[in-house]
Image: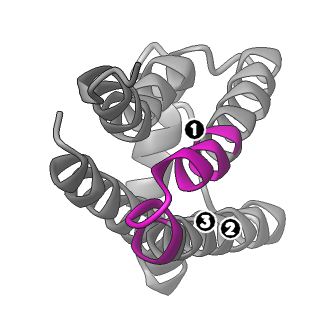
Amino acid sequence: MPHSSATSALKFASLFCAFIGLLMFASLLGGQNLMAMFLDIIHLPFDGGQSFSSDSELVLGAISGGLLFGYGVMAHQVTTHVYSSNPALGGQIIMRGICGWFVVDSAGSILAGAWFNVVLNSGFLALFLVPLLAARIAKPAHP
């Protein structure tokens, strides 16, 4: 994948990440049913058994949404101001951040009995890793 395409893909992944964070925040403004449905999906089977209404659930949703939004903004800035001109450094920063998130989020999801979230996390991980790795592979070899 050419560097310019990888940069565009990473910008998209970053903005998508920030958008999901905003959706989590929006659930606090009357979209609790949407978050309850998401929680029900990651705690398969899909049976309506999850809720998203207690004060604790709402504040954790606010914190998680804020962190996800902030990560998306930060990844976009790293892509725009670092990766675009220094792919090795920018890619390393993004890869360490997204892999760190993936390991902790996925391990925590498994411990919480929400194993299907690992599958969803894998899609998110791929949004960042595919362009980073594809750009590395496409890089011409230097003697």
Residue 87 included in the magenta stretch of the image? yes
Circle 1: element type:
loop
Instruction: Give the residue at mark 2.
Output: 67
The residue under label 1 is: 50
Vertical arrangement, residue 16 with respect to residue 49, above or below: below
Q: Is residue 4 above or below residue 137?
A: below
Query: Magenta stretch?
Result: 79-96
- Does residue 48 appear in this view? no
Q: Going 26% across and 26% down the picture, which residue do you hit?
A: 140
Which residue lies at the image location 60% right of the left edge and 65% below the top edge?
Answer: 71
**Disc 3: CA contacts within 10 A as few (<14), some (14-19) or many (>=20):** many
Secondary structure found at label 3: helix
Q: Nearer the viewer, residue 51 or 136?
A: 136
Q: What distance separates the C-alpha of mark 1 from that of mark 2? A: 22 Å
Q: Which residue is mark 3?
A: 71
Q: The N terminus is located in which quarter?
A: top left
Kind of element beneath mark 2: helix
For the point 43% across and 31% down, the residue is: 129
